Image (cartoon, grey):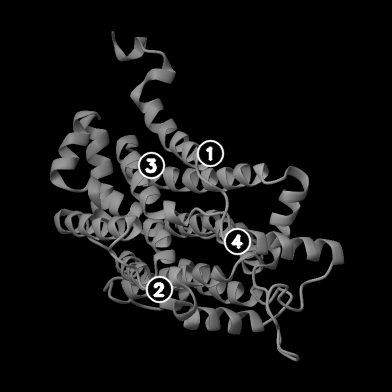
Amino acid sequence: MRTEQIPTIFRLKTIYRILPFWIVITICLASNISFPDLGHFIKSGEVMLESKAILSQDLFTHTYHGLHYINSGWLSQVFFAFCEKIGDLELFIFLKTILLLITITIIYYFIWNITKNYRISLIFIFFTIALGITNWSVRPQIFTIPIFAFFYSHLYRTANIKGSSIFLLSLLMILWVNLHSSFSLGIILVGIFLVGEAIEKYFDREKNKDLIKKSRLKKLLFLLILLVSVTLINPYGIDIWWDMWANASTSQGRSTEWRATAMNDFSGFCFIISIVISGIILKYSKRRITVTEAILLFAFLFAGFKSTRMIIWWGIVSAPILAVHFCSIDAISERISRGKGHGEFKAESSKLKAE
């Protein structure tokens, strides 16, 4: 039977498109939603909904008199309480599934747009899932995963940052800072793109004049300043930064999940394998690695070593970079070219190597 005679739904290209989402749905429906502190989040949210006020003390431990209590994930707790109220615990499964499907959709089409290959997109989506699956628990962080993925995808793929993009990212940052204390990751992403591209421009002999006049650099700098500013739009103002820093500084001593990544469990094993794969791909890639890509990889690789909770970000950041470098390996390029017209493939290959 010829390819064109096969029903669209049974064609390999369709399967490559559907499979990642089917896997995510299956994992979410089969997994247990319970987590040790989920009840804490729900109860805190219930109290805030009933009192229509932000918590001023921890409900489950003693808060010293006069101590300024900061509940950095207050909005996610309200969402949890609302979900439990209108749909009981079953709604958490739906919420988790939707948020992760949004994340996978963003990453999948991000990878596909830069590789134009469904098989490679599928491979590196599996790569991302394997590195992130242990952090798919129903807790405040799950709200921020699709936001992080969108920030990264947009900054990487958008050559011309428009006013609408700046406005949207600012709104997402306001949401992020009230959902979870990981909001600094969005600012770090913008900072990395700004520094990386500034270094690239500085060492470009033909374009090394008037760096600050470069449109994208100016917009990245403006976006960075704006994002830092809008983080103050929360119930605690600038204190949210001190709380974020305090948690980041002491978390490894207070919780086992924040300790350095151990190589004796599934997440640690996947992390090490991902490093080996990354090294092999970058060694044989014919595409020049950019300064921005190098900083992204080293920064989030370091974060992955620091804590198991950070491996998920390494998976999201590294997958698209590795995918585009994977396409430039000679053996892979030749294999891809068999399924494309020579002219079409040659144009895409040249573009990937030049970027």
Question: Residue under circle 3?
Answer: 112
**198 versus 98 height, above or below:** below
Q: Quadrant of the N terminus?
A: top left
Q: x%, y% of residue 295?
A: 33, 70
Question: Residue under circle 4?
Answer: 140
Query: Could you tell me the amino acid type at mark 2?
Result: Arg
Q: x%, y% of residue 280?
A: 17, 56
- Whole-number angstrom distance, CA of label 2 to CA of label 3: 34 Å
- Identify the residue at horizontal 52%, vertical 60% (top origin): 161
Q: x%, y% of residue 336?
A: 22, 35
Mark found first going from the N terminus, 3 or 1: 1
When asked about the image quadrant of residue 287, the answer is bottom left
Q: Quadrant of the C terminus?
A: bottom left
Q: Would you say 147 lies left or right of 347 here?
A: right
Query: Could you tell me the amino acid type at mark 1?
Result: Leu
Q: Marks 3 and 2: in contact by CB < 8 Å?
A: no
Q: Residues within 10 Å of mark 1 (few under 14, many from 20)?
A: some
Observer-nearest of 200 and 126 = 126
- Identify the residue at horizontal 44%, vertical 71% (top origin): 256
Question: Residue under circle 1?
Answer: 29
Question: Residue under circle 2?
Answer: 259
Front label number (2 vs 3): 2
